[in-house]
Amino acid sequence: MTASSFQSLATLFREKCQDNTEGDRCERCAPGFYGVVRGSHDDCKPCACPLANPDNNPTCVTEGHDDYRCTSCPEGYEGKYCERCATGYHGNPRMPGGHCEECKCSPWGALPGPCDPVTGQCRCRLGATGTPCDQCMDRHVEISGVR
C-alpha cells in the first residue's frame, strides 16, 4: 500500500465517523462534545458552555465519569461551564437567549468598581441616577469635568 492510498484510507475512515465522534477509528468525541466513546450513539454529549447551543463555547474536556469543564470561555464569561459573567460584565448566560454584556458605567456619575453582575446597575454617585448613572436626579446639575 502506498503512502497516498494509506492517507486516502485514513481520510475515508475520518469522514465515516458518526454520532459526534472523530479520529482515525472514531475513537474520541469531536470538538464541542465530551464523553467516553464506547460505541453507543449518545456517547458524545454537547458541551453546554453555558447552554447546549452551537453558538456557545465549542470546547470542553471530560472530567470524571460524566462531567466536563469548558476550556475556552468567550470574553466576559467565567466559571466551569461559562455560566456566569466575569467582573465588568453583566447578564444571565444560563437563560436561553441570555448573554454577558460589558458594563457601561458613566465615568462622571458612577462610583469606581464593577456594575451589578446580573442587572448591570452601576453604583451611582450622590445625585446621579440611571443604570449607567448617566442622568442627574431632580434638583441636581452636571458640572463637566468635576468628579
Image (cartoon, rainbow, N blue to C red):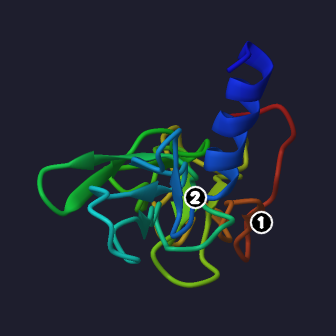
| Mark 2 touches mark 1? (CB < 8 Å) | no
Q: For this rendering, which residue is in front, 11 or 135?
A: 11
Query: Residue at position x 60%, y 45% from top?
Result: 74
Q: For this rendering, which residue is in front, 73 or 145?
A: 73
Query: Residue at position x 64%, y 52% from top?
Result: 103
- Residue 10 image offset from top left, x and y in percent: 64, 35
Q: Amino acid at mark 1?
A: Gln
Residue 135 marker: 1
- Residue 114 image offset from top left, x and y in percent: 49, 46
Circle nearer the N terminus (2, 1): 2
Q: For this rendering, which residue is in front, 140 or 147?
A: 147
Residue 17 marker: 2
Q: Amino acid at mark 2?
A: Cys
Query: Residue at position x 56%, y 66% from top?
Result: 18
Establish if 19 lies above or below 3. below
Toward the right, the furthest residue is: 144
Q: Residues within 10 Å of mark 1 (few under 14, many from 20)?
A: some
Quadrant in which the C terminus appears? top right
Toward the left, the furthest residue is: 65
- What is the total number of numbered labels drawn onto the structure image? 2
Q: Is residue 125 visible?
A: no
**In the image, is 78 to the left or to the right of 131?**
left
Q: For this rendering, which residue is in front, 103 or 22?
A: 22
Toward the bottom, the furthest residue is: 96
Residue 13 marker: none
User: In the structure shown, which secondary structural element does the residue marked by tag 1 occupy?
Assistant: strand
Q: CA distance from mark 2 to mark 1?
A: 58 Å
